[in-house]
Amino acid sequence: MKRQHGRRNLLAAIREEPVIAIPTELENAFEAHHGMVFRTAYRITGNAADAEDVLQVVFLRLMRRGHHAEAVDNHESYLRRAAINAALDVIRSRQAERTVELTVDLPHDETPELRRALARAIAQLPERSAEVFTLRFLEGFTNGEIAEALGISSVLVAVIVHRTRRQLRRELGSYLGDRP
């Protein structure tokens, strides 16, 4: 190996580095679920570049779990939740920029300001509330499906949905035409 002033040259470094092996389980999870992770992230961020970043973050986190990744009982549920949380992290980190767009069914007279306000409001929710709201209204899951995915009761999901909608309505009331 040739060194120059204590530094290896690039070719020598490449030859010495062990090959990075991607576990078959991780590869299979990626092949099966990368589209769902991207779509979930895109629905929340409204931005393809951010959704791609979320996709990478989610699978890097799964890879870092190493042998624990195989212990994940339901990859789809785990990855969907991870995508929601990573996408919400992106929204939270970009709040100061106020450039986040959110794709969701809004009133026909929606404005870009309403979309940004909704994204900011969701980002301010407690993690569980944001997760439930996203699964229910952006992903289209039923309360029963959410309960099963999160390992909580359907009644608790309904309570969280009700409280979250009420809180968001208060915060977005001026955009929705509500009076205080």
Image (tube, grey):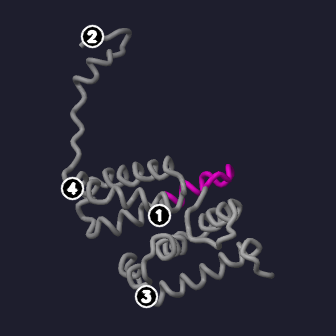
Question: What is the number of the mark on residue 25?
Answer: 4
Question: Mark 3 and 2 residues: CB-CB less than 8 Å, in contact?
Answer: no
Circle 2 sits in a helix, a strand or a loop, which is it?
loop
Counting residues from the start of the chain, the first of labels 4 and 2 encountered is 2
Q: Which residues are magenta?
A: 87-100
Relative side of 165 to 142, left or right: right
Contact, mark 2 vs mark 1 (Cβ under 8 Å):
no
Location of residue 103 (image quadrant): bottom right
| Residue mark closest to the camera, 2 vs 1 | 1
Q: What residue sits right under mark 1 in the picture?
A: 84
Q: Residue at horizontal 44%, vertical 49%?
A: 52
Label 2 belongs to which residue? 2
Q: Residue at x 21, y 49 (%)?
A: 23
Looking at the image, is mark 2 or mark 1 earlier in the sequence? 2
Tell me which label, 1 or 3, sits earlier in the chain: 1
Is 148 above or below relative to 122? below
- Image location (x, y in percent) of residue 62: 33, 55
Residue found farthest to the right: 180
The residue indicated by pointer 3 is 154
Residue 136: % across, % down: 48, 76
Which of discs 4 and 2 lies nearer the camera? The answer is: 4
First in residue order: circle 1 vs circle 4: 4
Q: Residue at x 61, y 55 (%)?
A: 100
Mark 4 residue crowding within 10 angstroms, few (<14) / some (14–19) / many (20+): some
Of the 4 image quadrants, the one containing the C terminus is bottom right
67 drawn magenta: no
Foreground: 11 or 31?
31
